[in-house]
């Protein structure tokens, strides 16, 4: 599918601007947050921040020259392409957000089981037996490692409470 | 130290095989899983290590620690997810080898380099301990600032194809590493209002996000991790791949030796750690190579150098703890707690008051490495099969399980969200060649860099010129400038040679 791959010709320079933009925004926030502090608390941040800003300025100048020469445009294709995978990627990030949000209510084991089922389905796994075996295997391993062995303070849900009652 | 004492210690340590083997196995598991650090595991096992005799406790802790350093390279080679910061450099050539279907061979190279690198430096430490312990005293805060910047610059130059992008990534990471309260007044900086960030950015969440989550988001573009041409080889791999890895390792024995010593020397410097050692060894290996242009495409030396140095660090880290009473890292700090609990006083007097324990620690390390080669080498063939699992299964497992592991360091749900944020940043960096390794090393070095910089500035009452006040520091500055200039010089020479070739062809 040719539309799925970056087109030859002009370089998509927009993608190269994302990390400098994030770094620039963070440096600005950092400087704002240390404005009222004593010099010992801000010396390091100022030194690193100034070097970072100088490096970003050089990168912007370099990209600007390439843009002026007509070698590139502001597209950010490398971040989106191939497009058929983009929705899987966005879906995985969204699913992980839901997974973290649901964890305090459903507990580690059940949340992980449901999240694995949804994630495998999202990735294109259709066979029901594979979906169930892999999801329950991962959830069981996580329970054994994190809750039963390491006694981590993960939120407990119905499965953890049931197993605790059974083995108490 | 007499031969009688040494031989007696070796015999005693071999007798502790029943303590060392579980330590090795646990260390391997902990090292393979990103998010599980040896220090956290040792802290969790403190009730056990405090309850048993000190010799057994130390044999167990040392075995776990060394095995952890060794196995961090396994996920770095197979799925480009380093088990720890020290294995980050291993991804550079280890993963390309996997993509070519040589994952099993890369694992064997990594294991042999790790074991022999660790063993050689441990034996060297035993012999040279009184002199090695002085190195840490030569480097003061001024020199340490330059060492940190030198390490970061090397990583930016080595890891990224574009030096400027590498430097931006490194300094971005360094600034992220400053998040949290300062060391003197506890004033919060850039915490976005989150109390969870007052202690700084958790390294485990950053590591998981930048490597594991971002890599999983990238890998779903392909059906398998292994490139099409390497699939057949990976599927057909048998014991001959292990033997071939052993043959190459033996052929490159000198490479293992000298890169291990790079690790040992850097390990002695408190705080510098395995991540810098591995990158410095990789850079040196590339610099002295006859084919530097092949580095990054999957060459054996690119796996041997960082893994050997990474394990050379293990004995080096313990030197300042044993000889000076200054722990070289978090793991050695935990070990020091156990020793102090048992009434041992660290420092030079330990070698006269309790030589059996002082030297026994390093003998224990040597014995652990000897056991390790027999434990892990046969597993290479089976471990390498993981790359044949389809990414439709592998990616969701990596993302969700490692996000869960992000919780383990501090037991905050917040860290799981933070790992996801780092995952998205890592994905963008990955796709645009702002190398994630440089960001991670920046985050690791950030707090250390600040500690040394502020210490130097307080001594000079805020005068920045203090950074150029020592001959050793100035030499390091010059080397730093040289390492920055070299890539540009190389590009300029290549362009000149190309132009001359073209001109010659036309005429």
Image: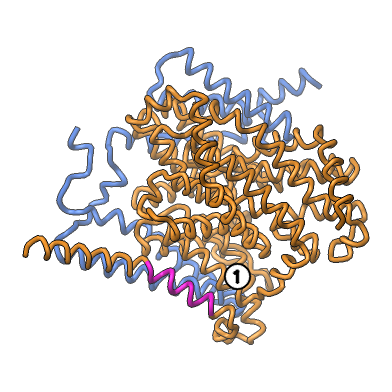
Chain colours: A blue, B orange
Question: Could you tell whether B357 is left or right of B83 in the image?
Answer: right
By secondary structure, the bulk of the magenta-drawn segment is best described as helix
Name the residue rendered at 62%, 27% in the picture.
Answer: A109
Looking at this rendering, what residue extends furthest in the top direction? A129
Magenta range: B475-486
Seen at 81% across and 38% down, the residue is: B14
Residue B308 located left or right of residue B43: left
Q: Give residue B340's position: percent from left, percent from top.
A: 87, 56
Residue B69 vs A42, above or below: the answer is: above
The chain letter for the residue carrying disc 1 is B
Residue B54 placed where, x, y %?
Answer: 88, 46
Image location (x, y in percent) of residue B26: 70, 35
Q: Which residue is mark 1?
A: B450
- Residue B23 falls within the magenta-colored stretch: no
Task: Residue B78: give x, y in percent of width and height.
Answer: 49, 36
How many badges with numbers are in the image? 1
Could you tell me which quadrant the N terminus of chain A lies in?
Answer: top left
């Amino acid at each position: 599918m040719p539309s799925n791959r970056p087109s030859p010709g002009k370089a998509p320079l927009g993608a190269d601007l994302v990390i400098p933009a994030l770094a620039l925004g963070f440096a600005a926030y950092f400087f704002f947050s240390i404005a009222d502090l004593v010099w010992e608390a801000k010396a390091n941040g100022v030194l690193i921040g100034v070097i970072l800003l100088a490096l970003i300025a050089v990168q912007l100048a370099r990209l600007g020259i390439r843009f002026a020469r007509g070698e590139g445009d502001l597209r950010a294709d490398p971040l989106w392409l191939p497009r058929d995978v983009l929705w899987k990627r966005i879906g995985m990030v969204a699913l992980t957000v839901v997974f973290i949000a649901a964890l305090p209510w459903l507990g580690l084991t059940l949340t992980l089981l449901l999240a694995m089922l949804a994630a495998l389905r999202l990735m294109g796994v259709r066979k029901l037996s594979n979906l169930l075996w892999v999801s329950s295997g991962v959830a069981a391993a996580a329970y054994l490692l994190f809750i039963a062995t390491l006694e981590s303070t993960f939120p407990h849900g119905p499965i953890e409470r049931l197993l605790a009652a059974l083995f108490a | 130290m007499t031969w009688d004492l040494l031989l007696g210690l070796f015999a005693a340590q071999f007798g502790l095989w029943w303590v060392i083997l579980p330590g090795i196995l646990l260390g391997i598991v902990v090292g393979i899983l990103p998010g599980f650090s040896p220090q956290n595991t040792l802290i969790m096992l403190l009730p056990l290590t405090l309850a048993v005799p000190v010799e057994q406790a130390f044999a167990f802790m040392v075995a776990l620690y060394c095995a952890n350093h060794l196995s961090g390279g396994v996920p770095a080679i197979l799925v480009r997810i380093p088990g720890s910061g020290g294995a980050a450099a291993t991804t550079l050539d280890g993963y390309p080898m996997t993509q070519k279907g040589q994952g099993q061979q890369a694992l064997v190279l990594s294991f042999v380099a790790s074991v022999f690198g660790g063993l050689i430096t441990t034996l060297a430490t035993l012999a040279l301990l009184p002199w090695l312990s002085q190195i840490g005293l030569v480097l003061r805060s001024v020199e340490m600032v330059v060492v940190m910047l030198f390490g970061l610059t090397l990583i930016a130059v080595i890891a990224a194809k574009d030096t400027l992008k590498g430097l931006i990534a490194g300094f971005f990471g360094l600034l992220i590493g400053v998040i949290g309260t300062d060391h003197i007044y506890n004033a919060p900086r850039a915490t976005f209002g989150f109390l969870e960030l007052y202690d700084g950015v958790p390294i485990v969440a950053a590591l998981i996000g930048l490597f594991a989550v971002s890599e999983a988001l990238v890998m779903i573009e392909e059906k398998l991790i292994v490139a099409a041409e390497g699939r057949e080889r990976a599927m057909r791999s048998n014991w001959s791949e292990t033997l071939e890895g052993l043959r190459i390792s033996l052929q490159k024995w000198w490479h293992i030796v000298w890169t291990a010593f790079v690790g040992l020397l850097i390990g002695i410097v408190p705080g510098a750690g395995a991540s810098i050692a591995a990158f410095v060894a990789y850079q040196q290996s590339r610099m002295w190579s006859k084919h530097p242009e092949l580095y990054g495409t999957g060459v054996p030396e690119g796996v041997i150098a960082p893994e050997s140095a990474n394990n050379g660090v293990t004995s080096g880290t313990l030197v300042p703890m044993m000889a000076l009473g200054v722990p070289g890292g978090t793991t050695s700090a935990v070990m020091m707690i156990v020793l102090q609990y048992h009434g041992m006083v660290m420092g030079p007097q330990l070698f006269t008051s309790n030589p059996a324990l002082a030297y026994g620690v390093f003998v224990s390390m040597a014995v652990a490495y000897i056991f390790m080669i027999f434990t892990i080498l046969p597993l290479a063939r089976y471990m390498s099969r993981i790359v044949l699992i389809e990414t439709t299964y592998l990616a969701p497992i990596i993302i969700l399980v490692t996000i869960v592991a992000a919780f383990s360091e501090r037991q905050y749900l917040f860290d799981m969200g933070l790992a996801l944020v780092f995952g998205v940043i890592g994905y963008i960096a990955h796709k645009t060649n702002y190398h994630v390794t440089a960001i991670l090393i920046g985050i690791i070095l950030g707090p250390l860099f600040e500690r040394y910089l502020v210490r130097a500035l307080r001594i000079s009452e805020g005068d920045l010129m203090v950074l150029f006040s020592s001959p050793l520091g100035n030499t390091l500055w010059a080397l730093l400038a040289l390492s920055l200039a070299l890539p540009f010089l190389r590009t300029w020479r290549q362009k000149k040679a190309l132009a001359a070739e073209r001109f010659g062809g036309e005429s």
